[in-house]
Image (cartoon, rainbow, N blue to C red):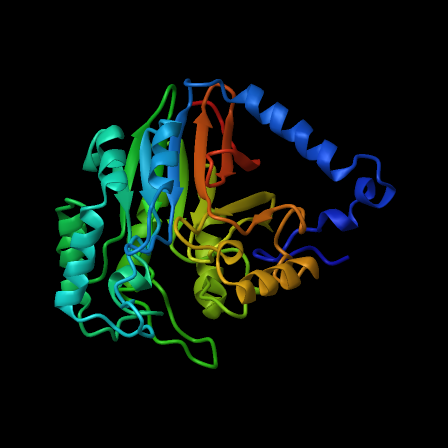
Amino acid sequence: PAPLRCGEPRERAAERPHAQTGAMPRARARAARLVTLASLVAAGEGLRLAFASCNLQMKPQPMWGRIQERGADRLVLLGDTIYADKRPGEASRPADVEWLREQWALQARNENFTALVDAIGGWDNVLAVYDDHDMGANDADMTYPHVREAQAAFCEFFHASGERCERPDGVYGSWDVAGDGGVLRVVLLDVRTSRTPYTRSGEGDFLGEAQWRWLEDELGREGADAVLIGSPISVLPDDRFISEFWGRFPAARARLLTLVSSSPRPVAVISGDIHYAELSEVRCGKRVLRELASSGLTHAWLAGKATGRLLYRFFQGFGYQAAYRPRRHEHHFGHLNFGEVEVDWRAGVMVGRILDSGGAGVMEEGLAPLTAP
C-alpha cells in the first residue's frame, strides 16, 4: 500500500493480525496496558496535569471536586468554561457584554470550582484558553462584535495579565512546567479571536499569522523537554460532520501538523469541545502523534436526553467518526469526564487518561515517548 501522508489515520486495530486472529481479547489487552502504564508512572512522583472542557455554569458542578481529589499539579481548561450564549429557556444567541460578565461572575461563585483553584495552589496554576461559548457565541469567530470585551472578561476571571490580555489577536499562551527531572511546555491555542468564517471551499484559518509565528517559536524555543499542545477543538480527526474541527480548514490543519512533526521535542495534543472523550492518532513520517480529547464536565452525549444517547450509540456502534482511533470501539467514552496527563521523565513516558464522574479511570494510554533530559 502507498505510505500514509502526514495527518492520515494509522491502520486500525481491526486490520492488525492479533485482532483478526483473536489472540488477545479486547478486555484482557486493555487490562494489560493499564497495569503496564501504572507501573511506569510511580504514584506521586510524576508531573500531573488535569484538563477539562464544557461546563454549563447554570448546572450543578460536582466534577470539580473529583478533579480536586486527584491532586493534580496544574489545571488546564480548554474552553467552554461557561456558556455565555445560553439563557434559561431560550435558544443559543450571542451574548452582550453585560450578560457575558454576569455569567463569568456566576461561575466565580461556584464553591466547588473555587475550592479546586485554592487546592491547586491558586490562579497561577490554572492554565486556560477560551472556545466559542465562553467567548460569547456559538461557533464564534473574528466577526463576533465583542471580541475585545470577551478577552477582557476572560482575563479578569482567570486573574491573567500581560501580553496575552493586551494583544489584539487572542489569549493564546505557553507555560513551562517543571517536574521531577524535566520541563513540559504547555501551549494553548486561541482558535477563535482570529478565526475566519467557515467557507464551502474550506479556505480559511484558525490562528492568524501572528499566532502562527508565535507557535513556531514556542515549538522550537529552548528550555523544554517535551510539548503539550492544547486546542479547544479537535486537531487530528478530520472525519467529523456535526462539530468544529481543524479539518474544516484543511490547509491550516496541514500547516499545524507540519510544524508539530518537525519539532525537535516529543509532542502530544489535548483537546475538548465534543461532549465525549476520545483518543486519536496520526502518523507523520516516523512520528506518531496522539491527541486525547476530554469534554463534558456538566453535559455529555450519554448524560443527556434520550435522543442524544441514541444518536451517540448509533454512530459509535457503526464506527462512524472512528477512523483516527487506535481502537475504534474502545477509545471513546460518552459520559461525563475529565482528563489527565501524567509525565514521568525517569520512566520516559507521557500518559493520558480519562476519568469518569466518580473519579475512576476509564481510558489510559501512552501519549508520547520521552527522552530523558
Q: Tell whether 90 sits left or right of 237.
A: left
Identify the image quadrant of the N terminus: bottom right
Q: Is residue 366 visible?
A: no
Q: Residue at x 56, y 23 (%)?
A: 38
**Which quarter of the figure has residue 24?**
top right
Q: Can residue 357 be seen in this view?
A: yes
**Camera-side residue: 74 or 356?**
356
Q: Tell whether 206 sits left or right of 4.
A: left
Q: Tell whether 8 sits left or right of 242.
A: right
Percent of width and height locating residue 217: 31, 47
Q: In this view, does 16 lie above or below 212?
A: above
**Camera-side residue: 195 or 61?**
61
Percent of width and height locating residue 47: 39, 26
Percent of width and height locating residue 209: 30, 63
**Camera-side residue: 195 or 3?**
195
Q: Is residue 128 above or below residue 318?
A: above
Identify the image quadrant of the C terminus: top left
Q: Which residue is drawn at 80% across and 43% down?
A: 19
Q: Residue furthest right?
A: 21
Q: Tell whether 215 sits left or right of 29.
A: left
Q: In this view, does 347 lie above or below 320?
A: above
Q: Residue furthest bottom?
A: 200
**Which quarter of the figure has residue 116?**
top left
Percent of width and height locating residue 176: 29, 34
Q: How many marks?
A: 0
